[in-house]
Image (cartoon, rainbow, N blue to C red):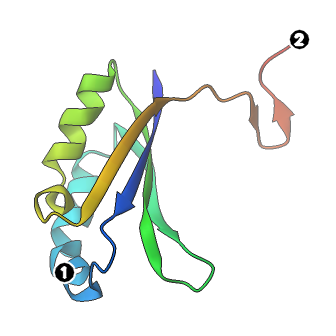
Amino acid sequence: MQFVVFFEDQPGTGMELRLKHMPAHLKFLEKNSELISAAGPLKEEDDSLAGGLWLVEAQTKNDVQRLVEEDPFWATGMRKSVQILVWQKVFSDGQRLLKL
């Protein structure tokens, strides 16, 4: 099952905290690359960081939640919230995947 994970950062979270934990976070993403197919920051128009997004392949939402909580960024308190949603891809690379 595919999931989209939206992270919202705590307001005022400094870049210093993010940079301090970035190497461990990236290593975590690499270690879990079979589950996390894409990940990256979400930004405001002024280029300030707002959160992050992952695309995850997992059996259950609980599996995704466990993965989120293992991420080194999670323990820092940098994340204000997380939302985990099931995602159904219906359009990709210019092609409809869902035939109606």
In the picture as drawn, the residue positioned furthest to the top comes out as 100
Q: Is residue 56 left or right of residue 28?
A: right
- Amino acid type, residue under disc 1 in the picture: Leu
Disc 1 marks which residue?
17
The location of residue 13, given as percent across then percent down, is 27, 78
Label located before the other in sequence (2 or 1): 1
In percent of the image, x 47 and y 31: which residue is there? 85
Question: SS of the residue at dot 1?
Answer: helix
In percent of the image, x 32 and y 51: which residue is there? 81
The quarter holding residue 9 reads bottom left
Q: Which is more foreground, mark 2 or mark 1? A: 1
The quarter holding residue 73 reads bottom left
Quadrant in the picture for the N terminus: top left
In the picture as drawn, the residue positioned furthest to the left comes out as 75
Crowding at mark 2 (Cα within 10 Å: few <14, some 14-19, many 20+): few
- Amino acid type, residue under disc 2 in the picture: Leu
- How far apart are labels 2 and 1 at the CA level? 48 Å
Placement of 27 over or under 91, stated as above or below: below
The quarter holding residue 65 reads top left
Question: SS of the residue at dot 2?
Answer: loop
* 46 vs 20, nearest the viewer: 46
Q: Is residue 12 left or right of residue 74?
A: right
Disc 2 marks which residue?
100
Placement of 23 over or under 81, stated as above or below: below
Quadrant in the picture for the C terminus: top right
